[in-house]
Amino acid sequence: MKILEDIKVDWRDRRLIQDLYMRQEAVIRIANEETEPAIIGRGVRQGCPLSPLLFSIYAEMMMIEAFEDSNEGIKVGGEVIRDVRFADDQGMLASSEGELQTLMKRLEETAKEYDMKVNVKKTKVMVVSKEEGKIANIVIDGQRIEQVEKFKYLGAVISQDNRCIKEIKARIGMAKDAFNKRKELLNKRFSKKLKKKMVKTLIWPVALYGCETWTMNKEALGRLEAFEMWVWRRCEKVSWKDKKKNEEVLDLVEEERSLVNSITKRKKNWIGHVLRGNTLLKVVLEGRMAGKRGRGRPRKGMIDDIKEGNYERMKRKAEDREGWRGWLP
């Protein structure tokens, strides 16, 4: 309640929240019997629409206090980015091992003041670099954090080489598993039209989760196109022994290659939304990172496949919402 008062929440609203959350009682049902009522000492109410907002406010105030007057982090476009988070999924960013250790120490100390604790077992550290084999020794509460080569954050695989091919492989694997669990797709009683609709409704979304951030290089394109044909061949029970070309299979299912085009459209819509706004994502896209650029040709970027000429031209085009919707790279 002190935090709500500090951020100038009206006293009427605070009293309403206090009456809703304080002095709560709960019973536990075992078989057909219930225990005596017990008072819930702390925490928010699961299932309550207000709970996520209260938790976010609490976490936000904790982060502000933890990193007040802190210069550690990654500098992009003149701004210091030290953390990215979604609810209680927290990611800390720093340009060196020492800075990351300082950030984690600040977070650990402030979390204790807020009666919260960093889960050391679930916390991982990863060094994103072109050079392999770099070690980062980060310690929390006297325990060394496990270093990994990749980890999953909000359903997407992030790897230390900063490439998306591992994520694409993982999504294709999950999509194939989803297809194999749908035995009705192989049932001859269903019409071809119904099977195609089921594939686009149940399989494509699994494969394309988070595709807006993928870098579409040659290897990624090859894997996605191969997966698309894998699905259509199994829908029509076409074996490799039949020696049918992909064009023949597409004619058989009355379809064209569309998976890569779907990714391009989704990426275009998302980038257009980002460019028309004023968010952290736009700062990251447009800002220059501190430090020197490495030698050699730069890697293909996330938005290179939808740019026409240069970034400024794409940005001006995105400002026209109607024109952007009808445009295809």
Image (cartoon, helix red, strand yellow):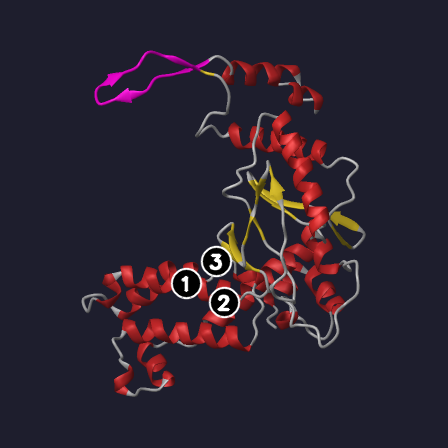
Q: Distance between the residues labelled 2 and 1?
A: 10 Å
Residue at 54% in and 44% down = 123
Residue placed under numbered mark 1 in the picture: 204
CA neighbours of label 2 inside 10 A, class few (<14), some (14 to 19), many (20+): some
Q: Is residue 279 visible?
A: no
Residue 311 lies in the magenta stretch: no
Residue 108 position by quadrant: top right
Residue placed under numbered mark 2 in the picture: 262
Q: Give the range drawn in magenta.
A: 24-39
In the rendered structure, the answer to whether residue 90 lies left or right of residue 174 reads: right
Q: Is mark 3 on a helix, strand or loop?
A: loop
- Quadrant where the N terminus lies? top right
Q: Are marks 2 and 1 in contact (CB under 8 Å)?
A: yes
Residue placed under numbered mark 3 in the picture: 209
Q: Distance between the residues labelled 2 and 3?
A: 12 Å
Q: Is mark 2 on a helix, strand or loop?
A: helix
Q: How far apart are marks 1 and 3 (CA)?
A: 9 Å
Q: Is mark 1 on a helix, strand or loop?
A: helix
State the mark number for residue 22.
none
- Whichever of labels 2 and 3 marks the residue nearer the N terminus, that label is 3
Which three-letter amino acid code belongs to the residue tagged 1? Trp
In this rendering, the answer to whether 223 lies above or below 67 is below
- Between residues 62 and 116, which one lies in front from this camera angle? 116
CA neighbours of label 1 inside 10 A, class few (<14), some (14 to 19), many (20+): many
Which three-letter amino acid code belongs to the residue tagged 3? Tyr
Which three-letter amino acid code belongs to the residue tagged 2? Ser
In the rendered structure, the answer to whether residue 281 lies left or right of residue 201 reads: right
- Between residues 294 and 21, which one lies in front from this camera angle? 294
